Image (cartoon, rainbow, N blue to C red):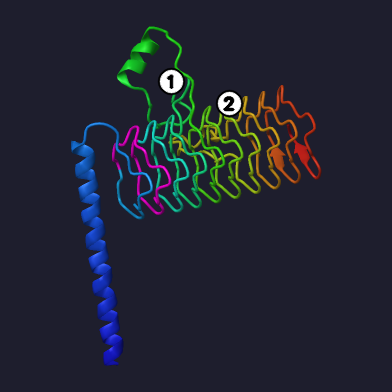
Amino acid sequence: MGLLVFLFQSSFEAQRELTSSRDELVRAFRDQVSTQEGVIDRSYREMRGMNLSGIELPGAILRDSDLSHIVLSSADLTNADLTRANLDGAQLQKITLSNSKLNGASIIGANLEEAALDCPLSGDDSWLPGTRSCKTENDQKDVDEKVVDREIDTRLLLADLTGSNLRFANLEGADLWSATVAGADLRGANMHETKLTNLHAQKARLNCIENPEPNPDPAAPKKDQCVDLRGATLWDADLRGANLSGADLTGARLNGAILGNTAYDRNRLRNVVLGDANLTGTTLVDI
């Protein structure tokens, strides 16, 4: 019994020291960010489990870093380089990742609910009340002067988002070439003109969320929040078993896509291109 008590106490002390050390690292890093001029470069570093919620790291270089289980909710990583970073299990709710590079990043099981992986091209955030605008003061001047916004170029090439929570995420215009979102929850996401060539989306949830905002008037009609895939490029995408009920696919390009056993109902498919698409086992209801 004495040995068990000793082992338990030793384990507890080791855990407390580890937690204390982690807290010190977080404080030191936040101090560095607030005082350092120029770009923060933490490539090839181990930052696992650090709580950096709300931190501002625009342009940060975090290539090949271990950011697994990190907390970056409401953080600003605009223009950051996260190439091949490990973000498995990360808490990324409401994070801003506009124009960031996430090529080859592993983001398995992460929570990206309401994440902004781009800025709305139109500047109109009304598709989801409460979504933050990514515009800077200069951007807003351009809008006021009716200057066309710059093209969105957030890159998630080959990124692995298996099982991740991407509900209401803003992916407008982002590039997810050969990315994996198998089993991911993308309900209510904005993927207007998103590039999804060779996407692996088996059993992904791309259907509507019923009435996401409670309406005080019970007699008022429900306003479902559905996935926006207007003009999206889905060439050779694997959508087997995915749920696309209610999604707006107006003008989407599905050339060569695999759509077997995919759920469609209440879809908007005007001007959709289905050249060489595989529709085996697919039922189109109430289109």
Classify residue 273 by image quadrant.
top right
140, 83: nearer the viewer: 83
Relative to 81, does residue 251 appear above or below in the rendering?
A: above
Residue for badge 2? 193
Q: Answer with left or right where residue 201 lies relative to residue 262.
A: left
Residue 219, image x, y percentages: 51, 34
Magenta residue span: 54-76
Classify residue 9 by image quadrant.
bottom left
Q: Which of the two marks, 2 or 1, is nearer to us in this view? A: 2
For mark 1, give the secondary structure.
loop
Q: Which quadrant is the C terminus positioned in?
A: top right
Q: Which quadrant is the N terminus positioned in?
A: bottom left
Residue at image x 55%, y 41%? 187
Residue 53, image x, y percentages: 31, 45
Which numbered disc flags the more N-terminal residue, 2 or 1? 1
Classify residue 78 by image quadrant.
top left
Residue at image x 22%, y 61%? 20
Label 1 is placed on what type of residue? Gly
